[in-house]
Image: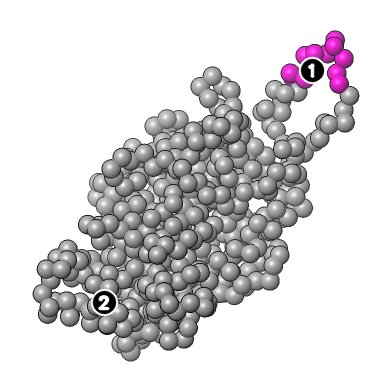
């Protein structure tokens, strides 16, 4: 049975967690309305053309100023909400991309870093890295990220914004937010792995050109599928535009789909999920006393088993001996908190859906997929997979209201068409033929071509959608010289996919990213 999940990183369709099949996952002029203006007299036929050309360059721009206190220091900034065109080879626009930028006032712009940020999906706007993690304002959530807030939502100053360290540009890829193709019939030209990378790359090139920021240090920060987009951009920007970035930040992301999509012969999803399941079982106090006493020890034991004996057991399939099968059942029960019979009945395959449904079955609770700390009741014990993701109750009800209000009331950007917070992209072109989508080779090529490029992967141990070991494995597999291994950095958090919904993790994120950027820019 399939469970359909959507989140800020995008839509995912999961038959079971380790058999993940990713379904990959605020029209009028917004600033000035000319409807009541008289028609220009015939002798001024040139004027509409000039105005059209001007609007094409800087259309629908809304600027405002603001201030946020970060680390006890007031940060004054200029915010711009507008669109940029994606240009075809003949210079004509093929799409318009909506973005919001925050630039520190009075700073030497050429010396100040700029970070291009986006969520994933595919099909997600940048709403959550914007109003959840990095921007100067954040959605007002409970501090622990565990309780559903009362709609309609709202925002508060983000004292953990990274605006004190870097200017920020939040990008909504084509067909999300207010971004759209010039010809709706040709929107598919942007809906694919490579198509998307090329479009976002063209946006970054044009933004740097118009804002005179080519000499600024440059970072990319992508969440979830944003890891695929970011890894591909690192190489594409360098090879196509000669734009060399200083750092890539991946938030709960992936580089290789084969770590998440299970098949008859691909057991990687089961392997990479096990340490996260152990961490979640520890959080819910379901492990044996010795493992419950030491979370780090529990995760280390789980990881060693997952990539050692468990991998071997899965490779043997049904030819495994009774003795080895019994030992594997006992070990998996120890590491997951699940009943041995349940594990045995499922042939040693524990997917995220089964784990989420069964870990707290005795309490009538199911776990969240994107943050398994969060629990809820789906009212159905007839199935062995959850019918809901309780974490969506924490974030899903206030994202659209908060973003739409923020755009119009704070950023002063007026537009009547819907702001597409999350828009499924069912026809996404993965373009890989008979293979899994991957940008692993792209990132390795980018790092070899730019030895100053550094990577920071942020991972939440309560994330059962893109569990930490999916990224750790991909990073281990990067085909780069040993001397470049020092350019790879990781940071882990207690919460899940959107770890920044937990204020303690959000604070740690600021510290980790600041230290990373300092290291990237150190001469």
Q: Is 215 a magenta residue? A: no
Residue under pointer 2: 345
Residue in the picture at 25% in, 61% down: 267
Label 1, secondary structure: give it.
helix
Q: In this view of the protein, which residue sits in the foreground, 455 or 502?
A: 502
Separation of disc 1 and disc 2 at Cα? 75 Å
Count of numbered badges drawn on the protein: 2
Residue range of the region highlighted in magenta in the rendering: 39-50
Q: Residues within 10 Å of mark 1 (few under 14, many from 20)?
A: few
Residue in the picture at 69% in, 58% down: 401
On screen, residue 139 versus residue 316, left or right, reads: right
Q: Position of residue 42 (x, y in %)?
A: 85, 11
Residue under pointer 1: 47
Q: In this view of the protein, which residue sits in the foreground, 483 or 118?
A: 118
The colour scheme applied to this rendered structure is one colour
Q: Residues within 10 Å of mark 2 (few under 14, many from 20)?
A: few
Indicate whether 240 appears above or below 505.
above
Label 2, secondary structure: give it.
helix
Q: Position of residue 292 (x, y in %)?
A: 36, 85
Can residue 113 be seen here? no
Q: Position of residue 251 (x, y in %)?
A: 46, 57
């Amino acid at each position: 049975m399939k469970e359909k999940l959507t989140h800020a990183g995008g839509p995912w369709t999961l038959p079971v967690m380790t058999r993940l099949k990713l379904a990959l996952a605020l029209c009028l002029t917004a600033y000035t309305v000319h409807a009541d203006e008289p028609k220009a007299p015939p002798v001024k036929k040139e004027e509409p053309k000039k105005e059209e050309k001007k609007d094409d360059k800087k259309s629908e721009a809304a600027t405002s100023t603001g201030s946020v206190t970060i680390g006890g220091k007031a940060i004054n900034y200029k915010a711009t909400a507008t669109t940029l065109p994606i240009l075809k080879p003949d210079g004509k626009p093929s799409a318009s991309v909506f973005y919001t930028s925050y630039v520190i006032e009075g700073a030497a712009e050429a010396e100040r870093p700029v970070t291009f940020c986006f969520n994933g999906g595919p099909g997600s706007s940048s709403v959550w890295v914007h109003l959840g993690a990095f921007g100067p304002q954040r959605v007002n959530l409970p501090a622990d990220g565990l309780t559903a807030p009362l709609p309609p939502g709202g925002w508060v100053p983000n004292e953990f914004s990274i605006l004190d360290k870097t200017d920020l540009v939040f990008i909504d890829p084509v067909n999300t937010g207010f971004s759209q193709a010039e010809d709706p019939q040709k929107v598919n030209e942007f809906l694919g792995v490579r198509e998307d990378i090329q479009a976002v790359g063209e946006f970054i090139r044009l933004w740097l050109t118009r804002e005179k920021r080519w000499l600024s240090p440059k970072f990319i920060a992508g969440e979830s599928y944003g890891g695929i987009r970011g890894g591909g951009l690192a190489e594409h920007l360098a090879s196509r535009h000669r734009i060399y970035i200083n750092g890539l930040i991946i938030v709960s992301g992936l580089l290789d789909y084969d770590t998440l999509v299970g098949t008859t012969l691909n057991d990687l999803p089961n392997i990479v999920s096990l340490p996260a399941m152990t961490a979640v079982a520890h959080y819910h106090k379901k492990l044996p006393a010795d493992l419950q006493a030491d979370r780090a020890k529990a995760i280390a034991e789980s990881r060693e088993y997952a990539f050692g004996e468990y991998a071997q057991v899965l490779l043997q399939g049904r030819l495994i001996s009774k003795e080895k099968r019994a030992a594997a059942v006992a070990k998996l029960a120890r590491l997951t908190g699940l009943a041995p019979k349940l594990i045995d009945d499922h042939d040693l395959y524990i997917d995220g859906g089964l784990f989420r449904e069964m870990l707290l079955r005795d309490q009538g609770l199911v776990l969240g997929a994107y943050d398994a700390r969060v629990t809820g009741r789906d009212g159905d014990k007839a199935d062995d997979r959850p019918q809901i993701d309780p974490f969506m109750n924490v974030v899903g009800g206030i994202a659209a209201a908060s973003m739409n209000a923020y755009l119009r009331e704070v950023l002063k950007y007026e537009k009547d068409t819907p702001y597409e917070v999350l828009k499924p992209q069912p026809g996404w072109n993965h373009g890989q033929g008979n293979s899994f989508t991957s940008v692993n080779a792209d990132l390795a090529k980018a790092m070899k071509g730019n030895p100053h490029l550094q990577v920071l992967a942020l991972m939440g141990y309560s994330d059962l959608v893109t569990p930490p070991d999916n990224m750790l494995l991909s990073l281990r597999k990067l085909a780069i010289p040993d001397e470049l291994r020092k350019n790879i950095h990781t940071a882990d958090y207690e919460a899940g996919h959107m770890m920044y919904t937990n204020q303690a993790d959000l604070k740690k994120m600021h510290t980790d990213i600041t230290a990373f950027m300092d290291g990237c820019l150190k001469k």
